[in-house]
Amino acid sequence: MKYIKYIILILIVLKSNMSIAFDKDLHVKITKNLRCLICQGQSVYDSDSEFANSLKILVEKKLIEGKSEKEIYGYLKDKYGQWILYEPKFDKNTYILWLLPILMFLIGGAIIFKLYNKKIF
Amino acid sequence: MKNRIFPAFLFIIFLVVFIIFYKGLQNSNVYIPDISIEKEIPIFNARSFSSNKKISSEEIFKKNKFYLLNIWASWCVPCRDEHPYLMNLGNQKNLEIIGLNYKDDKIKAKNFLKKFNNPYKFIFLDKDGTIAIDWGAYGVPETFLIYNNKIIKKIIGPLNEVSLSEIKNLIR
């Protein structure tokens, strides 16, 4: 009985450590996908500005509250607009951004295909 | 004919791409969040600057009244520049100025108010800067004119003659 108690205790400690590690990974992932509005070339994760440091604390608080990654992005998008996210959603303002690489890929493929066909025949 | 269409098509594609990037060069690469949207004010709990007790924002911001929320800090140089404008607005009978002391040292903040006078009816403490994020702010100073629990004007940076007269016109 005594051993069972110890095993349960060890499992609880291990589980809590695992959940903290998971949260930290998610925290890094989220802050790397947020743009710092003060030093606009950097992500919140890389920046050391007052704003970025506050945002890191806020993301941590939201994760502790049990908010999901999507909910945190939604909250920040509501406060600062789409620009705060490095990964913009597909909408009428961003469709060129998303479609242009595909278009370029198709055109490039067509060129290669054409040149290849010419060489063969 | 077939051989001509392909280079022409390619040329058009590259021209379109060139125009997109050329137009992009003309856009400012410094982003400022939208300041024209009428948004509900956030509800939050924070410590009072004077009593250090936790207080809800709902106890401070009432309906049918004008409020000016000013985010400030004693270490912020532009806050000193705008302080006379806040003192001026403090004389307006239909406006209450609420402060949000941002990531500051309390003793230094108290000295700041002693030196430049206190225009604030109430001051919230924001030790880690997360309440300012709740307001959609990203620096100090920032000022929000509020009516009926809605932000009707947002001023990024220090107040000046222009913003002062704009605020006075809006609360008239």
Image (cartoon, coloured by chain):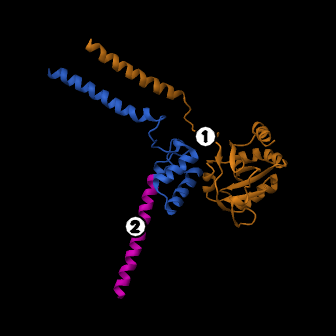
Chain colours: A blue, B orange
Residue at the image point whose x is 78% and y is 54% from the top: B120
Judge from the rendering whether residue B113 lies leftward or rightward of residue B102; answer left or right. Answer: right
Q: Quadrant of residue B78?
A: top right
Q: Quadrant of residue A99?
A: top left
Taking the view exactly as shown, the residue that stands out farthest to the top is B1
Q: Position of residue A47 (x, y in %)?
A: 52, 49
Number of other residues with Cα within 10 Å of mark 1, as a class: few under 14, some 14 to 19, many 20 or more: few
- From which residue to which does the magenta span run? A1-29
Taking the view exactly as shown, the residue that stands out farthest to the left is A121
Q: Position of residue A66 (x, y in %)?
A: 49, 62
Q: Amino acid at mark 1?
A: Asp
* Magenta stretch holds residue A6: yes
- The residue labelled by disc 1 is B34
Provide the secondary structure element on which disc 2 rests. helix
Closer to the camera, A47 or B62?
Answer: B62
- The residue labelled by disc 2 is A18
Q: Position of residue A55 (x, y in %)?
A: 55, 53
Number of other residues with Cα within 10 Å of mark 2, as a class: few under 14, some 14 to 19, many 20 or more: few
Q: Position of residue B26 (x, y in %)?
A: 54, 27
Q: Amino acid at mark 2?
A: Met
Closer to the camera, A74 or B62?
Answer: B62
